Image: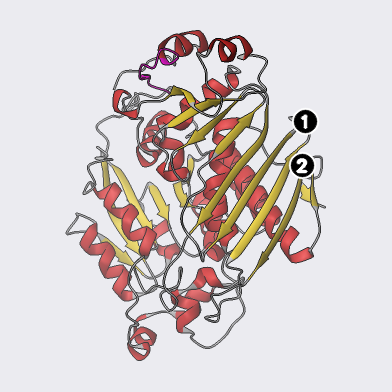
Amino acid sequence: MKNQKPVSRREFLETTGKGAAMAVLAGNAPAVLGAKSPNETIGVGHIGLGVRGGDLIRQVAGTKQRDNIEGAKVVAVCDVYKPHLQKGVERSNNPSVRTYGDYQELLADKGVDVVVIAVPDHWHAKMLIDAANAGKDVYIEKGWTRTIAEAKAMRAAVKKNNIVMQLGHQAREKTAGAQAAQLIKDGVIGPVTLVRTGRFENRPLGRNIWSWYGGYNEYTRPDPAQVVRDVDWKRWLGATPDRPFDMDRFWHWRCFWDYGTGIAGDMLSHEIDFVQAVLGYGIPDTCVGVGQLGLLNDGREVPDTWNTVYEYKKQGCTVTFVCSLNTREPLQPPEFRGKDATLRCDGIAQDVANFDVTGDSGSGKYAAQIEKGDIQPGKPFLKFDPKKTPELPSHMQDFFNCIRSRQKPRCNVDEAFIEAATLIMSVEAYKQERKVRWDRAKEEIV
C-alpha cells in the first residue's frame, strides 16, 4: 500500500463537485513499517477467549485475510472457563500453544511479548496495569474501564513502562473517517455545531441483546452443572462482590453494573470514539444522560434505552447519542452538521465505508452555487467513493506495526483516556440524575 497525501479541499471540490467519484488514501502509515528486527517473531498471549476474544485470536493467528499479520505467533492462551480455553487452543494456529488458567502465569511467560486482552470490563484495569508492569505491549478491548481512578492508574502504568497500547475501536481503521476528518478540518461543511450519533438494536423478546451464550447469535442455554465444573468462578469474580455462581452474570455480564457500564461501555463508546477520531475535541465539558429499562425485563440491571448529550464549550459544539435496544430501522449513522453543509456517514461507527456532503440552504459559503443551481440544498454535492480508495492497515495491523516501530497506535493511551472519561461521564450523569462537568485541572467528574 502506498502512502499518499489526502486531496486538498480545492481538489476535492473540483473532483466531486462535478459528480465524479473521490479516490484518496487517508492516513500516514504504510501497511508495513520499518523495524529494527523485521524477522523476529512476536510472541502473542491471548487473555480471554469468549465472544470477542475468540474473534481477535483469529486475526492474530492469521486465519482472517483482512489482517494476515506477518511475524506474529500465538504462543499462549488464558481463560478461566475450560471451553473458552479450548477454543483458544483450536484457533491459535499453533499445536504447541501454552495454556493458562491464571493470567499472571501467562504474563510471567518469557515467550510472550504482547498480550491481547478481551475479558469482562471489571478486569481491564488490573490486567492492563499488570501487563504494563511486566513489560508487555497490550491490545485491549473497549470500553477501556469503569472509573476515572482506574483510567488514571492505567494511563500512568502505560506511560511509566513505555509500552505500546491499542484500544479496540476498529472504526479508526476506516479511510472514510480519516478523510471526513480532513474535510471538516479544511472547512468544507463550515463550523460544526451539532453531531448526531446513535445505536439501535432489536431482537425478539427472549433473545435479548447481551443474553447470548458464547456467541452473538447463540441462545441455547448450556447445562449449569457442567458450566460450574468448567469455570473458576472465584477467579472470574476478581475484586467484585463475592456471590454464588450465577449463569446470568457469567454469560450476560454486560447486563450488570458490577462488571461493566452497559450501553455506555459498549455502543456509546464506539460511536463517541469515532466522533473523537474525526473531530479531535477531547473530553467534553458537560454531559446530561438519561436511561431506563423499557422492555428487556430479563433480570438485567442496566437500561435498554440510553440518551446522552455532550457539550464542547470551546468549539461551540453539541454531540448527541441516542440508543434503544428495542428498535432498529432506520439506523442513526454519525452525522456532522456544519453551518454550511452536513457530512453524513453510511453506517454505525465500525461499519462506516463512505459518506456524502449535503449543502444547506442557509449557507453563506455555497450561496452562489446554490443560486446557480450547481448545489441543491438537501441533496449530496460531494461523495466519497470507497471503491477507488485503498484500505488503511487494519486496527490490529496498526498495533503490530507500532510494536515494531515503537510509535503511537491510532487509539493509544491518551485517546483511551478520552474514551473512558467520556463514557463514564454518561454513567455518572445517569446515576446521579444531573448534568455532570469535567474538571480539566483535576481530571475529575464534578
> Which residues are drawn in magenta?
16-26
Q: Which residue is mark 1?
A: 314
Asked if the stretch drawn in magenta spans residue 19, the answer is yes
Q: Is residue 143 visible?
A: no
Q: Are marks 1 and 2 in contact (CB under 8 Å)?
A: yes
Which residue is found at the position 35% from the left and 20% from the top?
21
Q: Amino acid at mark 2?
A: Asp
Q: Is residue 95 left or right of residue 310?
A: left
Q: Position of residue 179 (x, y in %)?
A: 47, 25
- In this view, the residue in front, 380 or 156, is 380
Q: Vertical placement of 277 versus 25: above or below?
A: below
The residue positioned 56% from the left and 37% from the top of the image is 335
Name the colouring of the figure: secondary structure
The residue where tag 2 is placed is 285
Place of residue 38 in the rendered image (x, y in percent of width and height, measured from the top left): 28, 29
Mark 1 residue element: loop
Whether 368 is drawn above or below 113: the answer is: above
